[in-house]
């Protein structure tokens, strides 16, 4: 009885505090939004499997800038290309903040590039962009690495002898090895069990982050730490990945030649030594470990998932696959390696790749931004400590930007003469100062790997084109494609 009274009083106090807070917020010109409940906010109104779909629907009533409550956390949602561009590009300095996302805070311990702000973010981003470019990101050196890694992928697929196989780990190994060359200065065998275990960790991490449990962790982290569930298994596996990175960093430290850096870690360690007596320096061990973890996580799973989705699209639309192959045969042939300079001569192939990226909508809610101070935007005030979600899903599906936003249509990126045309609403990597640092690398990987695959193979699946479902298996933080066995038939 006493326990029931205690819970009742706690509920009444929470409700009163919520009502008091709602009254006080009227003095701030917040964007409009639906009414919420104490503690849970608007969570019960959101589709737990795809909250971005509910947000898009709510914007029809509340406009392109609206307020929702994810539990007790206030969030402002930006919907549509105009609102997203105005915030991230036109008011870039106001919207550079990154929120303390509980899941990422737990994984990175608060360090690294992905969730940093202020001087830490500026130092790490500038250094990371410069270093990755020095090691070839977006340049000839990286092109050669991807071409070499593609030969390993082609050999593995060739070994399947036109029998059904799951391409998931082949794609993950290939993409991961590219980022491993940049960051660790080495590649790993596709048969290395420890390497495959780390890749499984990345897959499970993204699946968890895109599940209702992952969403709940970010909204009620203390409660989820206490409750049993998948989160504990995911964090345990991520600790193994963290230990792998720390061991790799130590091996680099033991063999470091500052005059001849081999990779990103060497460059960071050299900078760390140079600035060890600079009190404002962000080049220290904790930031190195977490930034390498950021690059490894971000540089593997999203690109490999996009490649898997690409195969599904080409299997579902065999005529599109055939047309891409004909264009590749005409421009490159079936013998020499593709080069990035070929892309301008392959407008249909380029259009297909862009449309696939638009359709997969890999990170529909973006990585949330954060108000580091009060922000004035479109006549509203976004108070300090507010989560800001630039809804990329709404940009990539906006009807006034795309002729057929909900279906696969490469003509979105082709003019009447069949030449490639850009679309300003193509923002799969976000925009502004927080845009993905690996954008040029991902674009290069997708083009070179896909053209290499279609030079050598025609892809199908045992159930035929009609058996392929392009809707995601997991949604929320990331849209993850369904897994299919595919058949790679060598082209003669």
Image (spheres, rainbow, N blue to C red):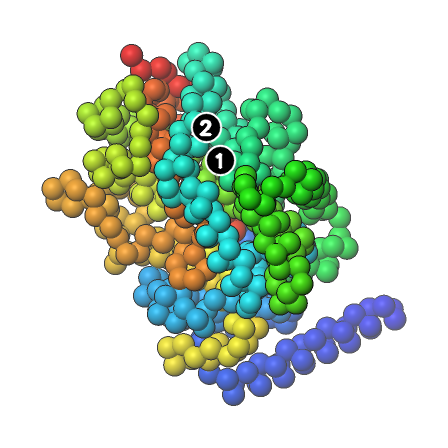
Relative placement, left or right, of 42 versus 331 is right
Q: Residue at x 45, y 28 (%)?
A: 149
Could you tell me how far apart the alpha carbons at marks 2 and 1 are, in whole angstroms? 7 Å
> Residue sitting at 82 percent across and 73 percent down?
5
- In the rendered view of the protein, which quadrant contains the N terminus? bottom right
The residue that appears at 45% across and 24% down in the rendered structure is 153
Instruction: In this rendered view, identify the residue nearer to me: 186 or 231.
Output: 186
Q: Position of residue 77 (x, y in %)?
A: 45, 66
Taking depth in this image into account, of 456 and 12 the one nearest to the observer is 456
Is any part of residue 293 visible from this angle? yes
Q: Which mark is residue 178?
A: 1
Quadrant of residue 335 within the rendered picture: top left
Q: Is residue 246 left or right of residue 337?
A: right
Side (left or right) of 353 relative to 93:
left
Q: Residue furthest left?
A: 417
Judged from the image, the secondary structure of the residue bearing numbered disc 2 is: helix
- Give the class, few, some or many, for how many residues have Cα within 10 Å of label 1's Cα (few <14, many ≥20): many
List the residue tagged with mark 2. 149
Where is 81 relative to 234, above or below?
A: below
Give SS at disc 1: helix
**Residues at discs 2 and 1 in contact (Cβ within 8 Å):** yes
Above or below, comparing residue 61 to residue 294 in the picture: below
Residue 79 showing in the rendered view: no
């Amino acid at each position: 009885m006493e326990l029931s009274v205690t819970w009742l009083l706690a509920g009444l106090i929470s409700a009163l505090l919520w009502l008091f807070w709602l009254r006080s917020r009227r003095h701030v010109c917040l964007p409009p939004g639906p009414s919420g409940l104490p503690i849970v906010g608007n969570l019960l109104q959101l589709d737990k499997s795809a909250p971005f779909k509910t947000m898009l629907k709510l914007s029809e009533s509340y406009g392109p800038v609206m307020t929702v409550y994810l539990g007790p956390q206030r969030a402002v949602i930006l919907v549509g290309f105009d609102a997203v561009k105005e915030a991230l590009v036109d008011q870039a300095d106001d919207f550079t903040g990154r929120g303390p996302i509980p899941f990422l805070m737990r994984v990175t311990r608060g360090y690294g590039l992905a969730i940093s702000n202020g001087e830490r973010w500026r130092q790490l981003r500038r250094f990371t962009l410069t270093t990755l470019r020095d090691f070839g990101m977006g340049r000839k050196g990286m092109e050669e690495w991807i071409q070499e890694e593609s030969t390993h992928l082609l050999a593995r697929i060739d070994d399947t002898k036109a029998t059904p196989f799951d391409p998931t780990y082949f794609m993950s190994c290939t993409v991961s090895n590219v980022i491993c060359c940049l960051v660790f200065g080495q590649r790993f065998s596709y048969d290395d069990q420890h390497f495959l275990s780390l890749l499984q960790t990345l897959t499970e991490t993204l699946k968890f982050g895109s599940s209702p449990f992952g969403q709940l962790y970010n909204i009620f982290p203390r409660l989820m730490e206490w409750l049993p569930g998948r989160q504990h298994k995911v964090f345990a596996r991520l600790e193994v990945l963290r230990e792998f990175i720390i061991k790799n960093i130590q091996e680099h430290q033991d063999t470091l030649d500052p005059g001849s850096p081999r990779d990103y870690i060497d460059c960071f360690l050299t900078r760390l030594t140079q600035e060890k007596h600079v009190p404002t320096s962000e080049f220290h061990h904790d930031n190195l470990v977490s930034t390498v973890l950021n690059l490894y996580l971000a540089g593997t799973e999203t690109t490999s998932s996009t490649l898997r989705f690409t195969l599904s699209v080409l299997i579902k639309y065999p005529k599109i696959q055939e047309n891409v192959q004909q264009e590749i045969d005409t421009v490159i042939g079936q013998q020499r390696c593709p080069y990035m300079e070929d892309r301008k001569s392959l407008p249909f192939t380029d259009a297909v790749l862009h449309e696939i990226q638009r359709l997969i909508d890999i990170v529909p809610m973006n990585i949330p931004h954060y108000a580091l101070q009060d922000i004035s935007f479109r006549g509203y005030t976004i108070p300090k400590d507010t989560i800001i979600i630039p809804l990329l899903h709404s940009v990539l599906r906006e009807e006034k930007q795309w002729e057929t936003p909900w279906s696969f249509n490469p003509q979105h990126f082709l003019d009447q003469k069949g030449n490639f045309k850009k679309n300003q609403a193509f923002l799969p990597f976000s925009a502004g100062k927080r845009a993905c640092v690996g954008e040029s690398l991902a674009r290069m990987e997708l083009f070179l790997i896909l053209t290499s695959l279609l030079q050598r193979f025609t892809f199908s699946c045992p159930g035929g084109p009609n058996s392929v479902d392009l809707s995601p298996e997991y949604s929320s933080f990331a849209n993850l494609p369904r897994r299919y066995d595919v058949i790679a038939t060598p082209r003669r």
